Amino acid sequence: MDRWSDFLSHISQGLFFISISVIYVSLVFVSFMFYCLFLQIIPHKRDFDYVIIHGSGLHKDGTVTQLLKDRCDKAIEVYRKDPSPPILVPSGGQGADEVCSEAMAMKNYLLSQGIPENRIEMEDQSTTTWENLKFSKTLIESFPGRHYVALVTSNYHVYRALRYCSKLNFSCTGIGARVASYYWPSALIREFVAVHREPKHLILFLIGYVLVIASILIR
């Protein structure tokens, strides 16, 4: 009987910690989600000098996917609303299974939408978000004059992109492009995991978890 009671006690404690863990992760995720949404509604100036467009995968024929098209369309919207049309900087290299660079595919799409070629400067060497920003920063700063920069990426991706900008000492305004509703939840989960793999976020996440568990055990 004592063994059975001990067994049930251990099961109960295990379920308790699992429940607390699920609740904690869920609350952190919801907070992350709302912050990502908040970034979309922060007002910003429209007089940009450059607008970086983050790359993503292409179709096999070298045309932009819907995700990348949405990013380009958002950049075009920013371009057309700007009182002095900025330089658009499509950023993305060529993957092993791609027929051209993502930057070239985006440039072709921008040209098809009426953007003049002299308002496009490609960054076609990057393979990651970090390189998108690092190489785009180098490209933009090679031009004289003012460098008021916007970066356009999918709305779920703005937070991480701006974190990288901060690390690069690169002042940018983040602008999120729409994402299909069916794709957004899974994309946001992947972004949440990617962000919390960074040492700073991981440490804060674990400290928060320990504090929650400790506060419960002390009671």
Image (spheres, rainbow, N blue to C red):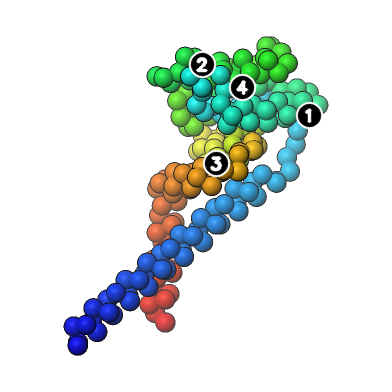
Q: Quadrant of the C terminus?
A: bottom left
Residue 184 numbered mark, or none: none
Q: Locate residue 160, reporting x and y percent.
A: 52, 41
Of label 4 and label 1, which has the lower sequence position?
A: 1
The amino acid pointed to by label 3 is: Tyr
The amino acid pointed to by label 1 is: Lys
The answer to which quarter of the image holds residue 105 is: top right
Image marks 4 and 2: residues in contact by CB distance under 8 Å: no
Q: CA distance from mark 1 to mark 2?
A: 31 Å
Residue 81 numbered mark, or none: 1
Task: Give the SS element for disc 2.
Answer: loop
Q: CA distance from mark 4 to mark 1?
A: 17 Å
Image marks 3 and 4: residues in contact by CB distance under 8 Å: no
Task: Give the SS element for disc 3.
Answer: loop
Estimate how packed mark 2 is, as few (under 14), some (14 to 19) or many (20 or more) residues with alpha carbons within 10 Å: few
Of label 1 and label 2, which has the lower sequence position?
A: 2
Of label 3 and label 2, which has the lower sequence position?
A: 2
- Label 1 or label 3, whichever lies nearer to me, is 3
Instruction: Give the answer, above or below, for where 219 lies relative to 17.
Output: below
Q: Locate residue 13, reporting x and y percent.
A: 32, 75
Residue 143 visible in this rendered orientation of the protein = no
* Circle 2 residue: 61
Left or right: 87, with 103 as reference point: right
* Circle 4 residue: 89
